Image (tube, rainbow, N blue to C red):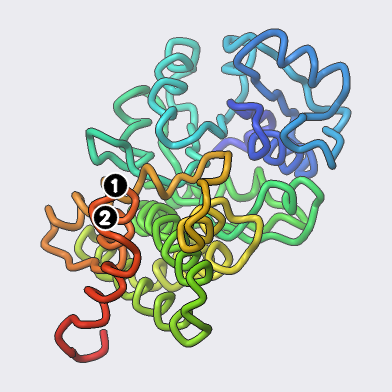
Amino acid sequence: MPSFKSVAVIGAGAWGTALAGVAARAGRDVVLYARTAEHAAAIAATRANPKLSSVKLDASVRVTGDLAVAAAADMMLIATPAQHLREAVAALAPHLARATPVIACAKGIERGTQKFMTEVIAEAAPDALPAILSGPSFAEDVARGLPTAVTLAAQNEALARSLVQALGSATFRPYHTTDIRGVEIGGAAKNVLAIAAGIVAGRKFGASAQAALTTRGFSELVRLGRACGARSETMAGLSGLGDLILTCASPQSRNLALGIALGRGERRPAGLAEGEFTAPVLIELAASQHVDMPVSSAVAAILRGAVTIDEAAESLLTRPFKAEG
């Protein structure tokens, strides 16, 4: 497998900027692609991104608005939101060399198709090698070089191992796996469950309810993962349980913040909460696999205004008693 000496990050938001720093610290030649020439020029001139203003971009990172320039790198990190992944990869595809690794760095399921991120990559860039990066991390922590561990999954173990070697450093520790579906389900489902955790906190249902919600939500995640062919150890790892714990507890989580606002009856906060887009798709997928996901279903119903929070809580608490699992 190649050593992947150069890395392109597609998407110059907070997460993309943080990942550009990760690749630079790992000793790669890095190019950061911004969608407009104006945005690229501003970042290049100031070495800062307004969406991540507390951290300066490494001096070695090149910033460009030319997609062809970015596509010349040995591997691609796609740092766009999940619902924009197809558009970004389709635009990139004509410029890519055959068998270039394209790594999705968003957590979600595509609306309308129920496709996971690597499936979207495979359709939008058939000659690429799809992979997925997920796990407990926030852009600001990663950009500041704080210790972080994540999971990188690819179909080929040798490829996954090589990609991990290309990105890993003393402060950013990726673990590799071939369980792509497990990583994708963990990353997508935890965003929906974080909204539920926020609702519990905002409604002041208490710490006991929060613990019950998190563990029962994790059971849902595992059930869906198994039905879709994921491995249990992946569900219990960084991209499953680890990511869920972080997202359900950290004030940096936009999904948690959305849930808290809903629980308090406040206006929804600004900013993208991927769980809001993922919730309806997740329960559609669960239904197609005949998997019961009552917590996630309740979140989806609350988000679309079909039930109130109190009605959803009563429905969950009056479900028939059952065995643990």
- Which residue occupies the foreground of this view, 40 or 177? 40
Residue 225 found in image quarter = bottom left
Q: Which mark is residue 34?
A: none
Residue 308 found in image quarter = bottom left
Residue labelled with disc 2: 301
Relative to 313, is 34 above or below?
A: above
Residue at (22% x, 73% y) in the render: 315
- Which residue occupies the foreground of this view, 130 or 315? 315
Tag 2 and tag 1, C-beta contact below 8 Å: yes
Give amino acid for label 1.
Arg
Question: Badge 1: how crowded within 10 Å, few (<14), some, or many (20+)?
Answer: few
Number of numbered callouts drawn: 2
Give amino acid for label 2.
Ala
- Which residue occupies the foreground of this view, 251 or 132? 251
Left or right of 16 in this view: 206 = left
Residue labelled with disc 1: 304
Residue at (32% x, 56% y) in the render: 302
- Which residue occupies the foreground of this view, 161 or 136? 136
Residue at (29% x, 54% y) in the render: 300
Q: Position of residue 262 (x, y in %)?
A: 46, 57
Relative to 294, is 278 above or below?
A: above
Left or right of 30 in this view: 294 = left
Residue at (26% x, 84% y) in the render: 325
Q: What element carries label 2?
A: helix
Question: Badge 2: how crowded within 10 Å, few (<14), some, or many (20+)?
Answer: some
Q: What element carries label 1?
A: loop
Q: Position of residue 296 (x, y in %)?
A: 30, 62
Left or right of 162 in this view: 307 = left
Q: Distance between the residues labelled 2 and 1?
A: 5 Å
Q: Position of residue 25 (x, y in %)?
A: 80, 43
Left or right of 286 in this view: 2 = right
